[in-house]
Image (tube, rainbow, N blue to C red):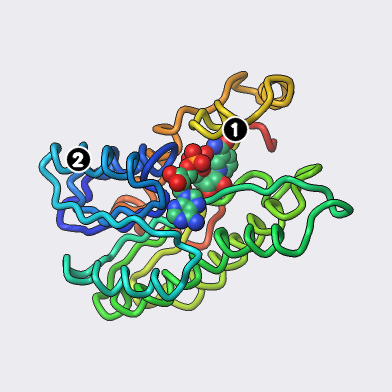
Amino acid sequence: MSLDGHIALITGAGQGIGRACTVTFASKGADLVLLDKNPETLGEVAHEAAGMGRKVMSDVLDLTELERLREVAEKARKMGLIDILVNNAGFDRPGTTAKIDKKAFEEVLGIHVTVPLTLIQIFLPGMRAAGWGRIVNVGSIYGITGGKGEVAYSTAKAGIIGLTKSVAKECGQDGVTVNAVLPGLTRTPTIETFMNERYKEAIIASTPLGRMAEPEEVANVIAFLASDEASFITGIALPVCGGWAV
Ligand SMILES: NC(=O)c1ccc[n+]([C@@H]2O[C@H](COP(=O)([O-])OP(=O)(O)OC[C@H]3O[C@@H](n4cnc5c(N)ncnc54)[C@H](O)[C@@H]3O)[C@@H](O)[C@H]2O)c1
């Protein structure tokens, strides 16, 4: 499974699943455009990918500042045709329907739906013109099951599934596939730092594989969907959850 000759843009590349994607994609030969708001972690992962012999451009930005995002995307085009887009960056603002405020709700929809839409609008025309492209959106199991106390996040993650399927229908004839992966609980710095142990244990107890995912296990599926080997797969929302949602 090679990604040689392709340029992949990965959002949220600094840590967790985005970082694992960066290293996996670099190991499969892709050149990379890496975006994140954290200068330290982004610098480290960009250095690591460059050390693997890949061409790397990285930019520090808050992706939800859409004007700045458009400028950075324009700059990224100088690397060449970006024909793989991984919409991964995300964050959570927990809250029930009674507690969530409008600002938090819109921030979560912004990062998980509006930012991916904006990047798709920017890069899809080039992929269609080239007759080959891969878009992989990182959703969540909560996008299909909902999550108690996770009303904004679950709504946003359901939204990205709708976006995935709609764009897939628009551009399939032009050789561009659009898919979503839906991780279950995955051992990333945010989960390790902020999720309380009782909550983690409850999820693991209802996961048939009996553990959380390592970020690389999610990245491997994203890399597969980004490769030629996945040429006849589009519009799917693929759980990578150890059976949690079964
Ligand atoms: N870890 C899990 O258990 C899990 C489960 C299901 C889905 N997901 C999804 O997977 C994706 C990655 O999750 P993760 O756990 O690796 O996250 P993480 O919090 O460990 O890393 C997210 C990265 O995105 C960056 N980022 C966040 N907001 C940004 C912004 N506005 N602008 C620029 N960069 C920004 C952060 O700086 C960070 O480097 C997210 O979309 C998340 O919702 C994660």
- To which quarter of the image does residue 195 belong? top right
Whether residue 88 is visible: no
Q: Position of residue 152 (x, y in %)?
A: 72, 55
| Residue 214 sits above or below residue 12 on the image | above
Residue type for callout 2: His
Whether residue 59 is visible: yes
Which residue is located at x 78 percent, y 47 percent? 95
Task: Indicate the secondary structure of the residue bearing disc 2.
Answer: helix
Q: Which residue is mark 1?
A: 185
Which residue is located at x 21 percent, y 37 percent? 48
Task: Indicate the secondary structure of the residue bearing disc 1.
Answer: loop
Which residue is located at x 60 percent, y 36 percent? 184
Q: Position of 147 compared to 8: left or right? A: right
Q: Which residue is mark 2?
A: 47
- To which quarter of the image does residue 212 belong? top right
Q: Position of 99 compared to 173: left or right? A: right
Front tag of 1 and 2: 2
CA separation in Å, label 1 and label 2: 28 Å
Residue type for callout 1: Leu
User: Which quadrant is home to the N terminus?
Assistant: top left
Characterize the local packing of mark 2: few (<14), some (14-19) or many (20 or more) Cα atoms within 10 angstroms.
Answer: some
